[in-house]
Amino acid sequence: PSTISQVESNLILPSLPALLKIAEILSVDVGSFFRSRGAAKARSVFPASEVRQIRLPNLPPEAIAAKSLTPLDFAGKVEAFLLEIPPGQTLSSHFFTYKGEELGYLLSGELQMNMDKAVHSLRPGDLVYLTSAVPSQWKNSGTHEALLLWIKIG
């Protein structure tokens, strides 16, 4: 996580083995990191075919499914994700180790979020805004899958 944070902050450049591992974790071709960003700035619409399944490293795959909605060549300052949490699943940590602003919108289902010794119950339409504190636990307390739109603001 610290290496990824340093790469994201432009403090270091990843080594070739690290770049290959990042591509493997993200399930993308290494060449996708080297696309020209010039064309992406002019795009306004991104087709569903560019959505990609990602793995959240510290969480079991059966507890959460994640899709990156933001294309790799996107030059904007936000990253959007669609998170699917099956009923009854409990996540023992937050989804990301990101240290910036984050925004979540519950599309469907029910979630409980533990943060700062408080339990927050979320229903469809509820919005979560995080700046520095992160939840210590997420739980799908409902009987249906919880679908959460999550945005990292950079």
Image: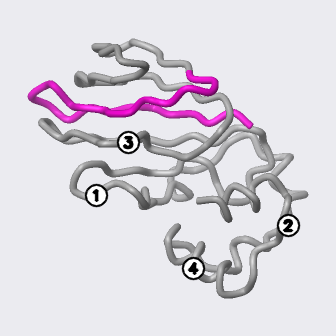
Element type at marker 1?
Answer: loop
Amino acid, disc 2: Ser
In the rendering, which numbered label is found on residue 93? 3
The CA distance from mark 1 to mark 2 is 34 Å
- Select label 3 or label 4 by which is in front: 3
Q: Which residue is mark 4?
A: 21
View extreme (front): residue: 117
Q: Position of residue 113 (x, y in %)?
A: 33, 24
Amino acid, disc 1: Pro
View extreme (left): residue: 143
Say if residue 123 shows up in the picture.
no
Badge 4 crowding class, 10 Å Cα cut-off, few under 14, some 14 to 19, many 20 or more, is few
- Which badge, 4 or 1, comes first in the chain's sequence? 4
Element type at marker 2?
Answer: loop
Amino acid, disc 4: Lys
- Tell me which residue sits at (23%, 24%) in the image: 109
Closer to the camera in the image, 109 or 19: 19
- Which badge, 1 or 2, comes first in the chain's sequence? 2
The CA distance from mark 4 to mark 1 is 18 Å
- Which badge, 3 or 2, comes first in the chain's sequence? 2
Q: Position of residue 57 (x, y in %)?
A: 43, 61
The CA distance from mark 3 to mark 4 is 23 Å
The CA distance from mark 3 to mark 2 is 35 Å
- Select label 3 or label 1 by which is in front: 3
Badge 1 crowding class, 10 Å Cα cut-off, few under 14, some 14 to 19, many 20 or more, is few
- Which badge, 3 or 4, comes first in the chain's sequence? 4
In the rendering, which numbered label is found on residue 36? 2
- Select label 3 or label 2 by which is in front: 3
